[in-house]
Image: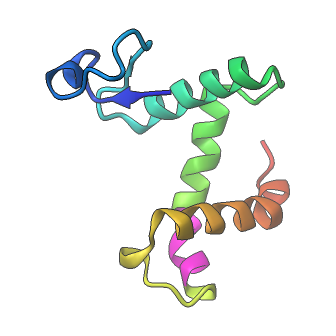
């Protein structure tokens, strides 16, 4: 899956991904999350919550992130991608059932 802010911007600097279905998100988190959700649904064949619900849950995680970082003794400004993924996975295990619809 390839995401970019504009649909064909990548062609200016990358020919290796020609022929891929590039999804533009316009810099909007909601659109990027929905595109990833839709791709995962298609690729996995699994039933997943809709894009709006995934975005709602992401917003809950974003609000909880400073506290989650504190528990992990991490500075939110220094969180790496690997840290972010690990924190999100742990948050989902603990807080998602309580978040409910």
Q: How is the image coloured?
A: rainbow
Question: Residue at 43% across / 14% down in the picture?
Answer: 20
Classify residue 13 as left or right of residue 93.
Answer: left
Residue placed most toward the observer, 30 or 40: 40
Residue 8: give x, y in percent of width and height: 24, 15
Q: Quadrant of the C terminus?
A: top right
The residue range painted magenta reads: 63-69
Choose top left, top right, bottom left or bottom right for residue 84. Answer: bottom right
Residue 3, percent across and down? Answer: 40, 29
The residue at 60%/55% (across/down) is: 60
Question: Image check: 83 left or right of 50?
Answer: left
Q: What residue occupies the far bottom of the structure in this picture?
A: 73
Give the residue displayed 81% in from the left and 48% down from the top.
Answer: 100
Residue at far front of view: 16
Q: Quick check: 30 above or below 19? A: below
Query: Which residue occupies 50% across, 27% down?
Result: 1
Give percent across and percent down for residue 57.
64, 47
Question: Quick one: which residue is furthest to the top in this view?
Answer: 19
Q: Main secondary structure of the magenta part?
A: helix
Look at the picture and state if 57 lies above or below 16. below
Residue 41 vertical placement versus 101 (above, below): above
Left or right relative to 31: residue 88 = right
Q: Quadrant of residue 61?
A: bottom right
Q: Quadrant of residue 69?
A: bottom right
- Tag count: 0
Task: Point out residue 95 in the picture as x, y percentages from the top left corner.
Answer: 77, 63
Asked if residue 10 lies in the magenta stretch, the reply is no
Asked if residue 68 is among those painted magenta in the image, a careful observer would answer yes
């Amino acid at each position: 899956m390839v995401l970019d802010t504009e649909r064909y911007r990548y062609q200016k600097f990358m020919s290796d991904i020609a022929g891929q279905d590039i999804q533009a998100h316009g810099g909007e988190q909601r659109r990027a999350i929905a595109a990833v959700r839709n791709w995962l649904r298609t690729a996995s064949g699994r039933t997943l919550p809709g894009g709006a619900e995934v975005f709602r849950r992401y917003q809950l995680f974003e609000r909880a992130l400073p506290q989650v970082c504190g528990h992990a003794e991490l500075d939110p400004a220094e969180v790496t991608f690997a840290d972010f993924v690990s924190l999100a996975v742990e948050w989902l295990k603990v807080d998602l059932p309580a978040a409910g619809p």
